[in-house]
Structures are given as structure tokens and as C-alpha cells.
Image (cartoon, rainbow, N blue to C red):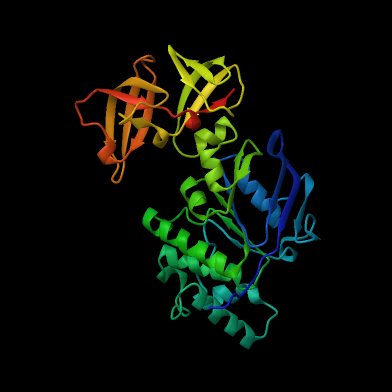
């Protein structure tokens, strides 16, 4: 199928927004490339929806500038900003048919041209044959497709998605995430999506802006955010992790309790703080001796299908629970409490 639209780059420059004494956005800046899908990820109240609403013109920023392509849209009314938007609730008109809902944004076009565009959109989202149905006759996933078709029908330069999957169950959500991502790539439309679901962000985004307290803490690819979190908040918010308090004991060593752990040579040179390590980086009972090999005790093993999660304590750090994720074959047998674990130096990230 041929592309029916194309995207433009988006620039967000120093957007600031307050609601009374509360600062919702504190000088937020982002660059989004043409055709890129960027996710705004963060907890409730972090500012991600406020930023989306400022871009849409539904909220007015106190200061800052917004561009689609080279066009300054900062003071334009919503209808002049050239975007399509898909809300969390879909906001379909229950008294209009599917085709009438999709055609709603095509005012000003001739009847035949609008009819042809609606047919293109129905084919695009896989709903041919449903044009005479009403939203109440459709499943949640089908309603979402209608809302998406309506947002795309005017061929906007920018697509805004406000928690579009939150009303769907997990199985439908995963399928539609994949479907929406494929469609977005096919159309080449620049897309900004708000979500608090890190799995959605990891699955769909070219880049993720992790937001907290009205600021962007890290803006990078999903892999960079997972493997190299820039701040303790990002490390804790995205994925699972282990934290160990340390004191520096040399250029590439740290004392954790009574243990002297080797660090990667390029690790941050803080004199004290916390070490961070992903659960899947930990090795249990290695076949050969490795650096940072320490005795430990198993506390609990949880079976998770294709992997297992093990809770354990380092013997030199009693009372401090850590977590490893392993394949079922690599997991110690239940009842074998004493184990050896490896915390590889390159997997230990230093936070002051």
C-alpha cells in the first residue's frame, strides 16, 4: 500500500508551564526528527500530558516556542497547527457511523473526495466493511482504529497520541502497539505519544523522553535508557534493578559492606553513593572463576515462564535483598541455599 501522508520535524524549545504555584513544565526542550516516533514516558503528574496539550494548543505555555518544520505554531489555535490527535477515550461520536466519524475532520473537501479518503483510511486500519456500523457495535480495539483513522484522514504533519492503549486489555494492547508502530513507519508520520507504560514505550519508540517533575531526565533510544540510565530516577522507573551502597576504595574498586568490588575503568569517579545493576546481568554459580564472585544465600525463586527471578542476599551484606533473572536451566535447584554470584564490573553503574 502506498504512503498516504508524511511527517515533518518537530522542535520544542524551553517550554514552561505553571498552574498556580505548581510548575508542570520546567524549560522542556526536544527535537523530533521527521518520521520519528517519540514517547513521553513518566509517572502521573510528571508533565507529559501537559506538554502534549501545549503542543496541541489545548493549553497555552507560559513561555517557550514550538515548531512543526520551520513553522512557529506557538500562538496558533489548535485547528491551525496541522496535527491529528488520538485521545485516551477515543472521543468518537456515538451517534455517527464509522465513516461519518472518520469524515468528520474532512470538512471543506468535496463529497466524493471525502468518500474516497474515508475508504483509504478504512483499508489502512483494516476495517473495510464496517463503515455503516456505530461505535457501540465495535470492540475497544476497533474503536481505537476508527479514532486513529479519523486522526490520520486530513494527512497531518504530526500525530499526537495521548495514552491510546490504556483502555485495552494486555493481549489486545500488545497486538495494537505492534500494528500502530508498523502503520506509523509505513506512513512516515512524525509521532509523539504519551504513556506511563514502559513496555509500550520500549516496544514502539525510536526515542524515549523520560520525564519527572516537569523535566526531561533522559532523552535517548530505548536500549540506551535501559542499559545506560542517566539518573537514579530513570534507573528505578525503567525496568528492574539492584542498588548497593558503596564507598570508593581505589580508582576502580568500591567497598560494599565487607566486599571489595571491582568497577569498570570508565565508571563515574564518585567517592560514595550507590551501585546499580540489572537483574539479568548477574551470573549464578559460574563454571569458571570470574571477577566480583561472592558467596550468597537464596531467599526465594519465582517462575515467570521463560525466565525465573531469584531473590538472594550476599553473605557479607545480610538483610539487603537483591534480585537476579535467569533462564530456568541456570536457576539453582530449590533447597540449594548456598550459591556463588557474579556482579560483572561492566554491569555496575555508579550513582553519587
Farthest residue toward the top?
Answer: 258
**Drawn side of residue 132 relative to residue 305, left or right:** right
Above or below, comparing residue 85 to residue 119 in the picture: above
Q: Quadrant of the C terminus?
A: top right
**Drawn side of residue 186 relative to residue 331, left or right:** right
The percent coordinates of residue 77 (x first, y second) are 76, 60
- State whether residue 93 appears in this view: no
Quadrant in the rendering for residue 220: top right
Farthest residue toward the front?
Answer: 288
Residue at x 50%, y 39% (from the top left corner): 238
Quadrant in the rendering for residue 133: bottom left
The percent coordinates of residue 23 (x first, y second) are 69, 36
Q: Nearer the viewer, residue 11 or 61?
A: 11
Residue at x 53%, y 53% (from the top left corner): 163
Above or below, comparing residue 123 to residue 330 in the picture: below
Q: Nearer the viewer, residue 49 or 280?
A: 280
Quadrant in the rendering for residue 308: top left
Farthest residue toward the bottom?
Answer: 112
**Drawn side of residue 102 relative to residue 51, left or right:** left
Count of marks, rendered view? 0
Above or below, comparing residue 303 to residue 251 in the picture: below
Q: Nearer the viewer, residue 276 or 23?
A: 276
Residue at x 56%, y 65% (from the top left corner): 185
Residue at x 59%, y 29% (from the top left corner): 266
The percent coordinates of residue 41 (x first, y second) are 56, 45
Q: Nearer the viewer, residue 179 or 241?
A: 241
The percent coordinates of residue 171 (x first, y second) are 37, 56
Above or below, comparing residue 35 to residue 276 in the picture: below
- State whether residue 314 appears in this view: yes
Amino acid at each position: 500500500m502506498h504512503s498516504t501522508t508524511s511527517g515533518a520535524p518537530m522542535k520544542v524549545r524551553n517550554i514552561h508551564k505553571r498552574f498556580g504555584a505548581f510548575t508542570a513544565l520546567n524549560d522542556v526542550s526536544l527535537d523530533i526528527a521527521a518520521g520519528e516516533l517519540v514517547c513521553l514516558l513518566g509517572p502521573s503528574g510528571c508533565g507529559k500530558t501537559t506538554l502534549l496539550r501545549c503542543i496541541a494548543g489545548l493549553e497555552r505555555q507560559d513561555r517557550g516556542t514550538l515548531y512543526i518544520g520551520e513553522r512557529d505554531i506557538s500562538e496558533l489555535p489548535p485547528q491551525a497547527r496541522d496535527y491529528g490527535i488520538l485521545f485516551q477515550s477515543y472521543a468518537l461520536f456515538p451517534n455517527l457511523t464509522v465513516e461519518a466519524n472518520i469524515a468528520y475532520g474532512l470538512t471543506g473537501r468535496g463529497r466524493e473526495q471525502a468518500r474516497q479518503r474515508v475508504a483509504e483510511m478504512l483499508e489502512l486500519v483494516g476495517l473495510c466493511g464496517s463503515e455503516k456500523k456505530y461505535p457501540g457495535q465495535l470492540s475497544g480495539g476497533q474503536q481505537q482504529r476508527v479514532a486513529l483513522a479519523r486522526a490520520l484522514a486530513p494527512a497531518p504533519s504530526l500525530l499526537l497520541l495521548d495514552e491510546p492503549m490504556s483502555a485495552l486489555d494486555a493481549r489486545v494492547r500488545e497486538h495494537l502497539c505492534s500494528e500502530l508502530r508498523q502503520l506509523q513507519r509505513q506512513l512516515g508520520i512524525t509521532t509523539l505519544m504519551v504513556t506511563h507504560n514502559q513496555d509500550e514505550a520500549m516496544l514502539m519508540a525510536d526515542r524515549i523522553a523520560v520525564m519527572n517533575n516537569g523535566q526531561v531526565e533522559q532523552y535517548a533510544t530505548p536500549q540506551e535508557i535501559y542499559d545506560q540510565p542517566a539518573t537514579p530516577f530513570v534507573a528505578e522507573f525503567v525496568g528492574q534493578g539492584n542498588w548497593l551502597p558503596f564507598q570508593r576504595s581505589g580508582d576502580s574498586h568500591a567497598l560494599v559492606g565487607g566486599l571489595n568490588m571491582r568497577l569498570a575503568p570508565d565508571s563515574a569517579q564518585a567517592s560514595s553513593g550507590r551501585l546499580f545493576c540489572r537483574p539479568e546481568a548477574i551470573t549464578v554459580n559460574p563454571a569458571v572463576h570470574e571477577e566480583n564472585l561472592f558467596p550468597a544465600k537464596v531467599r526465594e525463586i519465582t517462575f515467570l515462564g521463560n525466565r525465573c527471578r531469584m531473590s538472594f542476599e550476599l553473605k557479607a551484606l545480610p538483610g539487603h535483598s537483591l534480585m537476579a533473572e535467569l533462564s530456568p536451566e541456570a536457576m539453582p535447584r530449590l533447597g540449594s541455599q548456598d550459591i556463588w554470584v557474579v556482579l560483572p564490573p561492566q554491569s555496575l553503574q555508579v550513582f553519587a
